[in-house]
Amino acid sequence: MQLHQLSEQIVDRKNFLCIGLDTELNKIPKHLQQQPNAVLHFNKAIIDATKDYCVSYKINTAFYEAMGSKGWDILEDTLHYIPNTHFTIADAKRGDIGNTAAQYAKAFFETLPFDAVTVAPYMGEDSIKPFLEYTHKTTIVLGLTSNKSSEDFEQLTVLSKDSHSSSSKKLYELVIEKIASWATPNQLMFVVGATKASEMQSIRAIVPEHFFLVPGVGTQGGSLNEVAEFGWNNQIGLLVNVSRAIIYADASENFQQMAAAEAAKYQSEMAEILNRKLRL
Ligand SMILES: O=C(O)c1cc(=O)[nH]c(=O)n1[C@@H]1O[C@H](COP(=O)(O)O)[C@@H](O)[C@H]1O
């Protein structure tokens, strides 16, 4: 699925919710933990329960890599279980020199049929371009991340020079501005954390047309209304990820109903925002 199709799904399904499948064996309901292939079983149950309330699933590869080769099989089986009406993201945060980046791109876009992959931009152009060569896929670049440590590097003020002038900017602003010139908004998204909603407005001014992947609503405390207030663009432009607050909504035998109820709550808040914004 490409980004224009994701926009259509958002309007049709009346939500811009991405559910993060950050599954850990010791956090899933106790009664499932002893079953063979418990993590896959849990993921399928969560997808069955929530697919009507979201438009996307994000599989954070770390949770599967941590399980060894069995984990990679579960990741693959989970991906194939997701309906093709949903936008699929490999949250892998890759970033390496050109020939290695080309192998990462092949891994997530060819060997595995993900629609999108997250990448870390700090090794520069040759680490991103191999992903952008897949013009029918989406590359999601970390912009301003939701964690406190984004202060360490992303938020540093740097001097930006070209042949005519120099000005000071935040490093993440420079990164977003430069990378936006490497591909069209049809194949490029930026991660902007929901915990950084106030900065979202100035990022929108740099990239008015791009989709943002917005993690940090839910357990990390970001506000959905603030995200909609500051991150909205004229094509909606927002995909909000929630992981733990939905998938671990309940640890009892009712976990599916409770995950569905939590996802439905986000969906209806988003439907209200869409109604309000699209009427303007
Ligand atoms: O790229 C991401 O998805 C990401 C970027 C970021 O700035 N902050 C962030 O939390 N994430 C991811 O988004 C998910 C957030 O999970 P919850 O806090 O449980 O909703 C995790 O998979 C994180 O790795």
Image: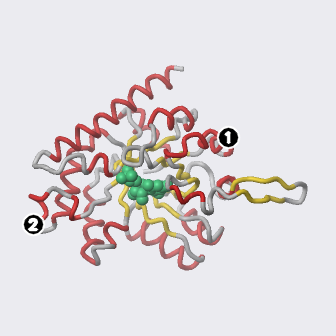
Residue plotted at (9% across, 66% down): 34
Mark 1 C-beta to ligand 1 under 8 Å: no
Q: Which residue, as the protein is rendered here, is positioned at the far right?
A: 164
Name the residue: 51% across, 34% down. Answer: 226
* Picture quarter with ligand 1: bottom left
Picture coordinates of residue 21 (x, y %)? 31, 56
Which label's residue is closer to the chain start, 2 or 1? 2
Residue at image coords 42%, 51%: 1
- Residue plotted at (12% across, 45% down): 254
Q: Residue furthest top?
A: 279
Above or below, 13 relative to 174? above
- Say which mark, if any, is on residue 34: 2
Whole-angstrom CA distance, mark 2 to mark 1, is 51 Å
Rendered location of residue 8, percent (x, y): 44, 37
Is any atom of residue 227 visible in this view? yes
Of badges 2 and 1, nearer the viewer stands 2
Q: Is residue 237 above or below residue 59?
A: above
Q: Do the numbered discs 2 and 1 sit on residues whose CB atoms are within 8 Å? A: no
Expressed as whole percent of the image width and height from the top left, the position of residue 190 reads: 55, 52
Q: Is residue 180 left or right of residue 187?
A: right
Q: Which amino acid does the dot numbered 2 rest on? A: Gln
Kindly tell me whether residue 178 is visible in this rendering.
no
- Residue 273 pos. (x, y %): 44, 28
Number of residues whose C-alpha sits closer than 10 Å to that of mark 1, classed few (under 14), some (14–19) or many (20 or more): few
Q: Secondary structure at mark 2?
A: loop
Local SS, label 1:
helix
How many circles with numbers are drawn on the protein? 2
Q: Quadrant of residue 63?
A: bottom left
**In terms of depth relative to the viewer, which is nearer, 179 or 6?**
179
Relative side of 257 to 235, left or right: left
Which residue is under mark 1? 205
Which label belongs to residue 48?
none
